[in-house]
Amino acid sequence: MSRYTYLLFDADDTLFDFGAANHNAFAKVCEYCGLLYSEELFAFYESINQPLWHQLDQGLVTKEFLVVERFRRFLGELGIDRDPVECNRIQLTNLGLSAVLLPHALEVVQTLAQTHKLYIVTNAVASVQRARLSGSEIAPYITDAFISEEAGAAKPSRAYFDYVLQRIDGITPENCLVIGDSLSSDIKGANNAGLPCCWYNPKGAPRPDGLRIDHEIRDLRELFNIV
């Protein structure tokens, strides 16, 4: 009998290569804005985008505000007269078209689906995540996806995980495992909800103080020995 029967996977940067998708989508935004894409320009955009996502994790902003505000600030800083709503539409549309998986994600999901129930738990934009998942190779192996927009709460809040647990028959805090790369949403969320967690840490970042990390992996295939 498996120790963890129900596996709750984060999506971006845990199963999906969000970095590749994000770069490609931003390049399309640059075309609309009449800008020449560069790594420096992308880094500048991310310096605006990432703090807003951290504010979302802290419950300080809404996702609806975030997705437009990041481009409003970006365009304002560059003095460019373009529509931030349209920039966001282009970004999200192109993110949804990219279903590039991280190394070994398909192999791991295919194998574990034979003995476990697999779910996606994500704060990503619902339209993007649904499109990406439906077009990906892992779609047949995922039982369901729980997206914060639809849940009315977001990771790391306990309310989000309560929503998830209420919708999975047979799941308990003892027989599930939250698997994700983000300390601030996945691991902190599991801590808040009293759930076991596994930190996917491919770059070997140092462990933080103040968070319970039950398992840590650098390669998704290490899950075979945990679950």
Image (cartoon, rainbow, N blue to C red):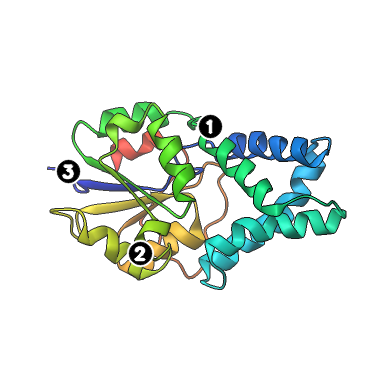
Q: Position of residue 190 (x, y in %)?
A: 36, 62
Instruction: Please name the residue that numbered disc 3 is placed on.
Output: 2
The nearer-to-camera label among 3 and 2 is 2
Q: Amino acid type of disc 2?
A: Tyr
Q: Residue at x 28, y 32 (%)?
A: 141
Q: Residue at x 41, y 48 (%)?
A: 10
Q: Position of residue 46 (x, y in %)?
A: 70, 51
Image: 141 above or below 90: above
Residue under circle 1?
A: 98
Residue at x 41%, y 41% (from the top left corner): 130
Amino acid carrying label 3: it is Ser
Measure the C-alpha gap from mark 2 to mark 1.
26 Å
Q: Is residue 143 left or right of residue 53?
A: left
Which is more N-terminal, label 1 or label 2?
1
Q: How many marks?
A: 3
Q: Quadrant of residue 186?
A: bottom left
| Mark 3 element type | loop
